[in-house]
Image (spheres, rainbow, N blue to C red):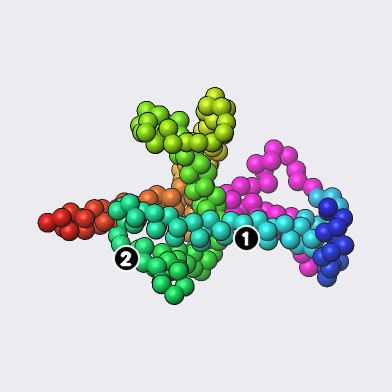
Amino acid sequence: MARNLRDFVPRKESKTHTAFDINEAFASLLDGVQLDTQDTGGSVTFTGEDPILPSNHRLGAIMAITTSLNPTLIVPSRLALIFVEDGLAPRWLGYVNRRTATPIWALTLTLLACLVLLVSKQLSLALNIAVFALILLYFLHSVVFLMLPRWNSELNREISINLPVWVQRTAAWLSVLSMGGLILVQLVHDSQTLRTTSLSQRISGHSLTSLELAIVWGLIGVALYAYARSQKRAAKL
């Protein structure tokens, strides 16, 4: 497959690039995720084709970025519609254009948030938080599945998947352990960054953590929930 990609994608750059310092670029790449070459425990050497600039591997990077853009831009607006239907968010947030069937306000707010991160050169944070949020959702879904027989036995009886119960619960436990481990790694890493750097340093260095953004997003969600509940109480009166 790698050979087919090389034949399919035209090579416009040579394998060597005198104006490009691969070590400097690699150090800059690691700095974006709060790491350093010393964290490898040894020296870093490069063999074969240049893996950062003049190579076809950028095609894979583009595919990875576009994959992350889906949960970053589309999933939040769809979740907003669900929250509005359940009365957990203000009704205006779930407004859908009748002609285009598009959740206008939810998509607009998501776009504005992404533009803020892009203009502030926090693009990697936007992609990281999308993946972190997905992992967190997988973890919560698995926990809810395990607790569903106790919390809502009637809903649990509606599960019609043709798999033995022990297989379902084993898969759920595996998801809880694996997703929980990934969440723990992210929290420990972000906590270390928060302890060793100040907020101004992280902003100027474009290295805000996923934990910080998750907290901000959570506070916004709590505010929207409180506003929706107050509207619901006012409507009953």
On screen, 201 above or below 44? below
Residue wearing tag 1: 66
Residue at figure coordinates x 49%, y 56% from the top left: 75
Q: Is residue 203 above or below residue 191?
A: below
Specify the amino acid type for callout 1: Thr
Q: Secondary structure at mark 2?
A: helix
Check disc 2: other Cα within 10 Å, few if <14, some if 14-19, many if 20+. Answer: some
* Residues at discs 2 and 1 in contact (Cβ within 8 Å): no
Tell me residue 199's x, y (percent).
43, 54
Q: Residue at x 61, y 47 (%)?
A: 35
Which residue lies under the disc numbered 2? 92
Task: Give the image location of residue 31, x and y in percent.
Answer: 61, 53
- The reply to whether the magenta stretch includes residue 26 is yes
Q: Residue at x 18, y 54 (%)?
A: 233
Give the label, 2 or 1, closer to the camera: 2
- Within the magenta stretch, is there residue 28? yes
Q: Give the residues in magenta.
A: 17-45
Name the residue nearer the viewer: 203 or 84: 84
Residue 127 vs residue 50, the one in the foreground: 127
Instruction: From the viewer's perspective, tell me whether residue 13 is left or right of residue 147.
Output: right
